[in-house]
Image (tube, rainbow, N blue to C red):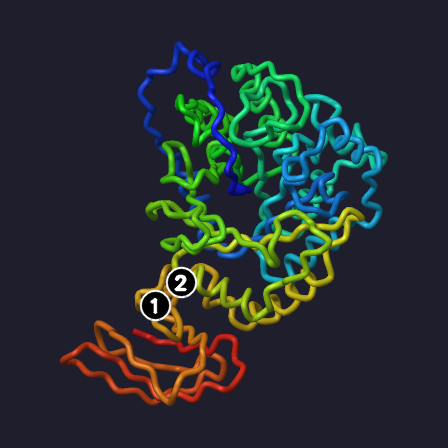
Amino acid sequence: MKVKTTLLAALMLVSANLFAQQANTPESTYEPTPENLEARKHFADSRFGIFLHWGIYSMFAQGEWYLNTGNLNKDEYAKAASGFYPIRFDADKWVKAFKDAGARYITFTTRHHDGFSMYHTAEGKYNIVDATPFERDVLKELTDACHREGIDVHLYYSILDWIRPDYPIGRTGRNTGRTLKPDYPSYFGFMERQLNELLTGYGDVKAIWLDGYWDHDEDSIPFDWHMPDLYRYVHSIKPECLIGNNHHIYPLVGEDFQMFERDLPGENKSGLSGQDISLLPLEMCETMNGMWGYKVSDTNYKSASQLIQMIVRSAAKGSNLLLNIGPQPNGELPEQSLDRLKSIGQWMRHNGSTIYGTQAGSIAEQPWGVSTDKADTTFVHVLSKVDNEISFPLAAKPRNVLAFEKRTKLPFKYDKKNALLTIKLNVPEGVTDYIIRIEK
């Protein structure tokens, strides 16, 4: 994930001639296959997924950026791998917790910016099987468990690297002690080979979630990542595999969904998601606490009610919510995360039909709440205490207005002249989401 920094942008002179034979080639068009379009719909219907930031950085308990923020030498940092032994990792327990919470998919960090691969790769020994005493492919165990339980698998992959000498250095990762020999064609080939491993060795991978494009967004000479080439390569292996890129700009040709970091679509509170909203499926990613990777001092968890309302607000924008957990170095999920998952699951079992398979609400957001749509039904989600009634514009008089939980009719009146619906209701104290079913 991106971290704000005041470091001056490096001059990327070497990048000017990279892939020179293709530098001026117009960006190709992208025609998704019918299978890809169906995969997009399936993804959009899912509405809730779990993000997992896990790597050897968890050993330091300072978050996933510690190699960078701690000003560590890469060789000293790498020594953590020799002690990484997550003895309490149990893929089946993880997946059961996610499934019970109502999550429909996971996104797992196969390789973060520190360059350590959390799966058994043939591209060097710096991976969880060859570099640690654990010697187990946690990605294989996790994806197998997901496939058994019907949880979709999405894979996060960092396109920037703080340790490889052939990666052309950007705005981050300058002080890790590596020998710089920038060679982007070499690095690009490395990424292709790793993505091939991930797409062919771990069952049905539904999506690739890329991160790090912003590493060169301050270059004085524009850096060409050759994303269309990478996207074509992924789609050549698996046309239906969705591609998203956490670049904080409008989607590029070849991408299949648009993501928003720490913001609902259309908001820009974090300064990372100011881009316009596309017609692609949408996904918002957010943390339960403050960090993506495990940080021992970060216990400032959002309440279960806040997280549930985040799921609701995201769906009301026509977006999925990808909710992050940073597993501990021993392989356990933090207890605070598990507690939140249990509460979310209880709520989703009763109310998930107002979230899964819905579209952005046709009723504009109100001070007291939002709405989601499904076929000829609108679900009004009252998220804060209101007086004895609510009013909002509605194009036509509804057939029925019901309290969702008890399926009892609510008294209402419809002002045809002003196209305004008023509903009488009594929202109990402490309700996370009072849901009204409007049948059109």
**Residue 167 appears at what percent x and percent y?**
57, 21
Mark 1 or mark 2, earlier in chain:
2
Question: Of helix, strand and loop, which one carries label 2?
Answer: helix
Residue extending furthest left? 417
Q: Is residue 46 left or right of residue 228?
A: right
Crowd tier of the residue under label 2, counting other residues whose Cα lies within 10 Å: few below 14, some 14–19, many 20 or above = many
The amino acid pointed to by label 1 is: Glu
Q: Is residue 216 left or right of residue 107?
A: left
Which residue corresponds to the image point at 64% horizontal and 58% vertical from the top-left?
Answer: 99
When asked about the image quadrant of residue 188, the answer is top right
Can you say which quadrant of the picture contains the C terminus? bottom left
Which residue corresponds to the image point at 28% horizontal and 78% vertical from the top-left?
Answer: 398
* Residue in front for this viewpoint, 234 or 260: 260
The amino acid pointed to by label 2 is: Ala
* Residue in front for this viewpoint, 436 or 387: 387
When asked about the image quadrant of residue 412, the answer is bottom left
**Residue 298 appears at what percent x and percent y?**
67, 56
Can you say which quadrant of the picture contains the N terminus? top right
Q: Distance of mark 1 from mark 2, alpha carbons? A: 8 Å
Mark yes or no: residue 324 visible. yes
Q: Is residue 277 above or below residue 344?
A: above
**Residue 104 appears at what percent x and percent y?**
56, 54
Question: Of helix, strand and loop, which one carries label 1?
Answer: loop
Q: Is residue 344 above or below residue 90?
A: below
Q: Which residue is mark 2?
A: 316
Q: Is residue 372 above or below residue 282?
A: below
Q: Which residue is mark 1?
A: 365
Q: Which mark is residue 296?
A: none
